[in-house]
Amino acid sequence: MPHRQASIEIGLNAVIVSVAGGMPQIVHVNDTDDRALDSLPFGPFDPIHHRTFEIGLRSWVENQTALRLGYVEQLYTFGDRGRHRLSGDEGPHVVSVGYLALTRQTPDSESMLARHNSAWRSWYDYFPWEDWRTGRPALLDKEILPSLDSWAQDPPGAGEAPKPLSRSERIRLAFGTGSTSWDEERALERYELLYEAGLVLEARRDGRPAAQARETLPFLGAAMHFDHRRVLATAITRLRGKLKYRPVIFELMPETFTLTELQNSVEAISGRHLHKQNFRRLVENADLVEPTGATSTATGGRPAALFRFRHQLMSERPAPGLRVGGR
């Protein structure tokens, strides 16, 4: 019997993040065949023209979006067989290298994105339970936790791999129930639990038994093509953690900004409301910003002092982040 040679393609998925209008926004791609589902931007890796994955990523992102990326970090390699749900799973095996990329929106980015069937969208449209800025999301107690508690009582399915912790313990840690507090850095764990419990549309589409057994599914945010919502959850977890020990938030800020604008951006990413005076004390103690001497009247109220990031901090010492809440 002739040996069938495996065919592998390498692609680059990007979670491109900005903050605008008080929301953490990502670039999403509209599927012209299925407008009900979004995808993350994707570009092929061309080893002839691009020496590294990151060079390839920056190249196609700039060509397709008119955005110049600032901070870029590789997230993970997503290579499970069947992740693109090809008919019969006989097509080339697609290995996708996921990236987190931070940028600032530009006046011409929206028109450029539109030409590539893309646009900005809040990441809380996909993960509404992650936004605690105005209080505990009602969706948690109305839909998510009752459904998860019911699932936790069910016996494990046939062939289900044993886990070190029980379902109830995993729910407690991920969702901060009982004596455990909410940890914004567990976004990926929360999504994976919802997928495993069959509560998201992706689980039903992928034929997961827990989802197939349910007559109806609650609406838990917008679904995405393939495993892209998992990739996005990975990026959210990574960025929320990175925020606390690296000054990455300034990749999302304009050159000058008020402390209120900085606080709003940190809150948008972390999904937490922060006490104004505590936040300002945190910024001052970290010595991250310096006054420009100018003021802004953009809000229509009293003039607010404008600040900028202290770039020389990077050469003085390892630059810290903003340790807001969390573990």
Image (cartoon, rainbow, N blue to C red):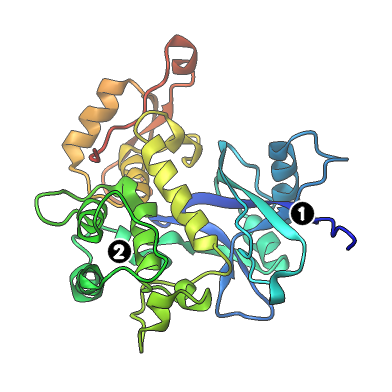
The image's mark for residue 9 is 1
The answer to whether residue 267 of the structure is visible from this angle is no
Q: At x 54% / y 61%, what residue is drawn?
A: 228
Quadrant assignment, res 135: bottom left
- 324 vs 80: above or below: above
Q: Is residue 320 left or right of residue 100?
A: left
**142 or 207: nearer the eye?**
207
Residue shown at the point (68%, 38%) measured from the top left = 54
Residue 129 coordinates in the image, percent (x, y): 30, 64
Task: Check disc 2 and report its element: helix, strand or loop.
Answer: helix
Location of mark 2 (residue): 129
Give the x, y percent position of residue 267: 31, 48
For the question of whether residue 200 can be seen, the reply is: yes
Q: Is residue 284 above or below residue 212?
A: above
Q: Residue furthest top?
A: 316
Residue 96 rendering spot, x and y as whole percentages: 65, 52
Q: Position of residue 20 (x, y in %)?
A: 45, 54
| Distance (Cα) linking label 1 and label 2 | 35 Å
Residue for point 72% across, 59% down: 93
